[in-house]
Image (tube, rainbow, N blue to C red):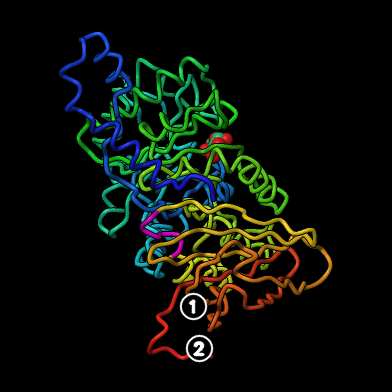
Amino acid sequence: MGRHPLQAEQAGAEVMGATPALPLLPAVILVALVAPVLVLENGLLRTPPMGWLAWERFRCNTNCDEDPENCIRWGQRVAGRLEEEAGEKLFMEMADRLAQDGWRDLGYTYLNIDDCWSGGRDTQGRLVADSKRFPRGIAFLAHYAHSLGLKLGIYGDLGNFTCMGFPGTTLDKVVQDAATFAEWKVDMLKLDGCFSTHEDRALGYPKMAAALNATGRPIAFSCSWPAYEGGLPPKVNYSELANICNLWRNYGDIQDSWESVLSILDWFVQYQDVLQPAAGPGRWNDPDMLLIGNFGLSLEQARSQMALWTVLAAPLFMSTDLRSIAPRHVDILQNPLMIKINQDPLGIQGRRILKDQAHIEVFLRPLANEAYALVFFSRRQDMPYRYRTSLAQMNLTSAKLYEAQNVYTGDIISGLQDKTNITVIVNPSGVVMWYLYPIRKQGRSQD
Ligand code: GLA
């Protein structure tokens, strides 16, 4: 498994807490030691964030005349009155669905606006929402979300423009925009990096983290910074990043296709030695939104994305139409054991531990209470494959007796010891996912 991320975190904590030795050091060394200030001290997102994010499904649809149901807006004034009819208010309707259809109670609490909400800046330079599509402003939307027990996320861009050409947050606007978001009572900021330079980002992301802290409002900070630097060292310093951002996009945008899911997965696996230790409570790699409920994935592939994202300790941001999502997709997204695994308190990102020549791959995520999540993933395109293995073959060589629960079927497999033969049948582009936990030898039957 390589270095245990918790060890990495504890080591980091020791360094930061090493004040007793400092008074003995000359002032100049002291300055050098404390220079990389820990700017993000918000204590947020001890487990990966869960919620809904507009972008993948609803993009920059501002065509409210022709597509009133799906355009990016909150409400609309018609003849001076606020149009209250159902279908007029994408974000309000998603908030209602999150609160009423069981999502919020399972942990999907963030309602996140993405690009294309802005109407520019006012005479004092403050960001304002588009007055036609968000007539009562973002503060009203935050209030509505809070009244339903939800949190509101907003989108900004550390550059001249957002990716879709709306006003960006240039370096001179960072402090003002952080104050505006706090005043609106926003709970999360996704700060994109279109139309910025390497230098802008190196200054701007830490500056925004400090500015958010200075507002006194806990605002989770999602940074696209690494994605704009190629996602890898030496250009990306993940230890430093974890002191600045709660989560970060490492790689390109997800699109509504299986090919896109695989391209992201492949990259995360290829660089797992770098990425896996970077994640932990309060700091998460973000492989981008869940496509489940949309158009591009088969049911097997939808189950696979959910299982793989969960084992990678990824944020669970749905981006689908919760007004019309099919029950089979709801079942995937609302699977309680899946969510429990995703939200495991240790916050250890999983890794691919095996790549079989039969095109079966095994992913493993260590969990609290000496449990594990195991994902058997098929890259095959022929038929369900009987994959034979054992815990020992997956390097789980403890003398303990294990039981496994199939996360999707609920079936329990008892009496597993390290040499026990295991056969799992994995569908093409599908997964079998297990929650594996030790059981006491006393008081439990083994069959
Ligand atoms: C970038 C981001 C996407 C989305 C769009 C909005 O491409 O990576 O997630 O926010 O910008 O324009």
| Residue at x-position 28% and y-position 46% | 140
Residue 144 magenta-drawn? no
| Relative to 259, residue 424 above or below | below
Q: 380 or 62: which is nearer to us?
A: 380
Q: Residues within 10 Å of mark 1 (few under 14, many from 20)?
A: some
| Residue at x-position 48% and y-position 42% | 277
Q: 406 or 10: which is nearer to us?
A: 10
**Callout 2 amino acid:** Gln
**Pointers 2 and 1 in contact (C-beta within 8 Å):** yes
**Callout 1 amino acid:** Leu
Residue 185 falls in which quadrant of the image?
A: top left
| Relative to 98, residue 411 above or below | below
Secondary structure character of the magenta stretch overall: loop
Helix, strand or loop at disc 2?
loop
Q: Position of residue 84 (x, y in %)?
A: 37, 56
Q: 182 or 24: which is nearer to us?
A: 24
**In this rendering, would 431 be left or right of 122?**
right
**In this rendering, would 53 be left or right of 220?**
right
Q: Ligand 1: give its quadrant.
A: top right
Q: Position of residue 291 (x, y in %)?
A: 59, 55
Residue 344 magenta-drawn? yes
Q: Position of residue 324 (x, y in %)?
A: 54, 66
Which one is earlier in the sequence, the residue at label 2 or at label 1? Answer: 1
| Residue at x-position 53% and y-position 58% | 311
User: Magenta segment range?
Assistant: 341-346
- Which residue is tagged 1? 401
Quadrant occupied by the C terminus: bottom right
Q: Position of residue 286 (x, y in %)?
A: 51, 44
- Which residue is tagged 2? 446
